[in-house]
Image (cartoon, helix red, strand yellow):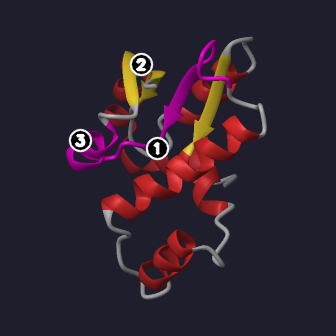
Amino acid sequence: MKYRTFILFGAPGSGKGTQGKTLGTIPRFYHCPCGDVFRSIDTRTKVGKAFLEYSSKGQLVPDDVTVELWKEAIDAAVDGHKFKPDIDILVLDGIPRNVNQAKIMRELIDVEKLSISRAQIAKLCSGGEETRAERQSPR
């Protein structure tokens, strides 16, 4: 079964997480922020160890490992009855980050909506690094 999915795209600090969190409060929407997935990795698992192997050296984690981490988090949400794929819409922010990840995820998600705020793009473009730094300062 492919997950009905909304994807939120944008630069760091552009409001993806805020939009996703808001959508996640609406019944039948399940928000899965990729940042939370990475922060809650169990480094005792095979994929957790693979993630740690790269991240501990400051290297980018390969796309297949990143998508597998995400898939494990989604599977756990399904098993825990937090995400019900037969009736819920999955809201993603932070993944996919590139075309290769999107290709890997193609068999798992059915994208119904892509969203990026034009206002956020304009704000980032006009405000430059200062605006982005201000939005991320509490993180």
Q: Secondary structure at mark 2?
A: helix
The answer to whether the residues at label 1 and label 3 have Cβ atoms under 8 Å apart is no
Q: Residue, x 48% and y 73% (percent of image)?
A: 51
Q: Nearer the viewer, residue 83 or 62?
A: 83
Q: Secondary structure at mark 1?
A: loop
Q: Is disc 2 surrounded by few (<14), some (14 to 19) or many (20+) residues within 10 Å? A: few
Cα–Cα gap, marks 1 and 3: 15 Å
Residue 129 marker = none
Q: Amino acid at mark 2?
A: Ala
**Residue under numbered circle 1:** 94
Q: Secondary structure at mark 3?
A: helix
User: In front of the other: label 1 or label 2?
Assistant: 1
The answer to whether the residues at label 1 and label 2 have Cβ atoms under 8 Å apart is no
User: In front of the other: label 1 or label 3?
Assistant: 3
Q: Residue, x 60% and y 37% (percent of image)?
A: 32
Q: Amino acid at mark 3?
A: Lys
Q: Is residue 134 at all visible to an observer of this figure?
A: no
Q: Residue, x 35% and y 25% (percent of image)?
A: 122
Q: Is residue 89 magenta?
A: yes
Query: Which region is colored magenta?
Result: 84-105
**Residue under numbered circle 2:** 119
The answer to whether the residues at label 2 and label 3 have Cβ atoms under 8 Å apart is no
Q: Is disc 1 surrounded by few (<14), some (14 to 19) or many (20+) residues within 10 Å? A: many
**Residue under numbered circle 3:** 103
User: x, y (%) of residue 3?
Assistant: 48, 25
